[in-house]
Image (cartoon, coloured by chain):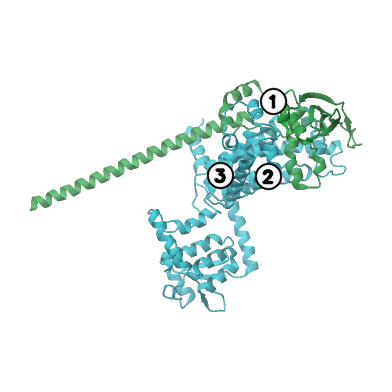
Amino acid sequence: MIDLKAILKGWNEFWFAPESPVPVAVFRILFGLIVLQFCWFMSGELHSLLGQKAIVSQAAASAWDPNARINLLAWLVHSDGALDVFWIVFTLAAACLALGLCTRLSAVIVYLCLISCDARNPFIFTGADNMLRVESFLLVFSQCGAALSLDRLLSVWLCKKGAQGPARPGNPWALRLLQVQIALCYWAAYSSKITGGTWIDGSAVYYVTHIVEENRYALPYVYDHIWTCRLLSWSTLAIEFSLAALIWFKELRLPLIITGILFHAMLDFTLIIPQFQTVMIASLISFIEPGTYARMAGWARAQARRLAGEPLVAVYDGSFDLSRRLAETVRRLDVFALVKLIDLRQASAASAFGQPPALPQAGEVLVTKVSGQGWDSGLRALTRVAWRLPLVCILCPLLYMPGLGPLLAGIARLFRRLYPGRAPVLPESAA
Amino acid sequence: MASDAGGQLAQVADTGSLKAKMDASTDAIGAARKTDKKALLNLFIICYGLGSFIMCCPPSKFRDATVSAIKPLFDCFGLYQFFYMYAPDPPSVHRIHICADISFADGTSRVWEFPALDSFKSDFYKHQSKHRYYQWKYYLFFPGAYPQILPDAARWAARMNRDPKNPPVRVVLFNRPEITLLPAVDTGRVTALAAPGSEFFTYQVRPGDL
């Protein structure tokens, strides 16, 4: 008997059970970098490939596929100069996507640019570009900016009460659909290969590795020997089938991801197919579960602690707005747990550190203590933190440059007047 | 006085119950919206998943008929997918030479070869950039399948060979493939056979093409 309720429950859990946004955020970073590389590779031949006098005209591309398509290049770009501007916007959007700045908007722009390029000249794109297009579409709907992003750091300063705590688990349906899409890509590779004769008789790898224009390094013996080629052809079928079907089993997932990455790395060593292997490796990484990331982070933190010694103790006042926001920023930047943040309001703070420092009275936002030494405050304290977390350097001039405080306070007042629903920025509290 | 206070109390009680009713109805609307959103999401997931699955299946009558029905919608959003990946069989082509026999105004002619990827192997960036031409060359290799792109290819070849004093007047495209031969077992060596070239397109160049 099949229990319909159990099926529905399984369906809901698979698509909608809240999950950490870290896996999709890691994928977003890799994806953004790959799109940046795509822009870099294309920029050298941009006018020849997509310009007004390109190798394929817009009319020929439209004649080949008369279906209506979203094509910003046909609608907005009518000169090579405009194409350059389009490319700059595309590249900036890819950079913002990698950094997680205005993430959703960046993802939309990247998606529109990618599909426009394909609509303009579909004869120059490969399976890698195909994957990039489809993945960019799904990324638009995902919570890819909810972790490891500048958006998340900025939310500490822009939200009314200052966002706090680790990234909240969210709805992972877009990531799941992305994973289904990746598995379908391997399914397409496997199912179409088994209909051909050369993959079954094992000679396919011989033909593939002897396409001179796609061959990167000609290994002696390996690809010239028919039995080696047979073994590699059949292994390819087995790996592609496993990555389509067996990757869904929890116990097999990590070994298969590692196998897949090695498989693509070997292909990259042998063949030059621009970006295909990197796209597929990044796609496979999206299958890594949040628990695995947590274990990896734990291991990395232990190693970092072994190298950097005991964490730096930093005390802040949780009731003081600026102090709380600064502490939250440090917490979000501190991937390796190199700084131990303690809220002065907590009862444990006094007992743990004896004489607690008087933060608000001194007008300071953070004090630090190095074992065996005294307390540091102000710029000195922040500099100590910056030695551990170099990105904190950006905050130093914002908080301590003379005259900058009143200027930012003015901007904050203006911001509050323009957007009454949003928060005052830091200098109000600093003052 | 007492009735006044009673009335006020009743009014407060009424306001309280009204607020509770309003909260309850707001919650109900919120829950209904959430259900609607989830239903739409489920519909989208099923449609997208099924469409992608059918597109990723090997060619069959059912697959082809279904794909031709859903392709316009997937095409519109740039989501049509096709993964070649050397399937069903990799090409047994060692190297593709697509060439243009270009005749100039003064009666002379020159054979010009479209960018060959292996000549850029030492330069990583150039090799990656020029790969796009290689991809395009593959479509030219099957000229009967993509006749729309042939005039542009001939025009581009003419532009690559333009000379204001002696402009190209005619371009003939032809291919000259080298076929990979399978080695005998245990005595493997890279083997290739040059196939005879064949002309597949002739184009008369106009001044505006250059």
Q: Earlier in the sequence, mark 3 or mark 2?
A: 2
Q: Colour of chain A?
A: cyan
Could you tell whether B8 is left or right of A118 in the image?
left
Q: The disc labelled 2 sits on which kind of residue?
A: Ser
| Closer-to-camera residue (B210/A74) | B210
- What number is the disc on residue A107? 3
Q: Chain of mark 3?
A: A
The reply to whether callout 1 and callout 3 are in contact (CB within 8 Å) is no
Label 2 belongs to which residue? A43
Q: Which of the two discs, 3 and 2, sits closer to the camera?
A: 2
Q: Which of the two discs, 1 and 3, sits closer to the camera?
A: 1
| Residue ID at (86%, 32%) | B182
**CA gap, disc 3 to disc 2?**
20 Å
Could you tell whether A190 is left or right of A177 in the image?
right
Q: The disc labelled 1 sits on which kind of residue?
A: Gln
The reply to whether callout 2 and callout 1 are in contact (CB within 8 Å) is no
Q: Quadrant of residue A86?
A: top right
| Residue ID at (80%, 38%) | B116
Could you tell whether A340 is left or right of A123 in the image?
left
**CA gap, disc 1 to disc 3?**
33 Å
- What number is the disc on residue B148? 1
- The kind of secondary structure element at disc 3 is helix
Numbered disc total? 3
| Residue B95 x %, y % | 83, 34
Q: Chain of mark 2?
A: A
Q: Colour of chain B?
A: green
Mark 2 is surrounded, within 10 Å at the Cα level, by few (under 14), some (14 to 19) or many (20 or more) other residues, namely some
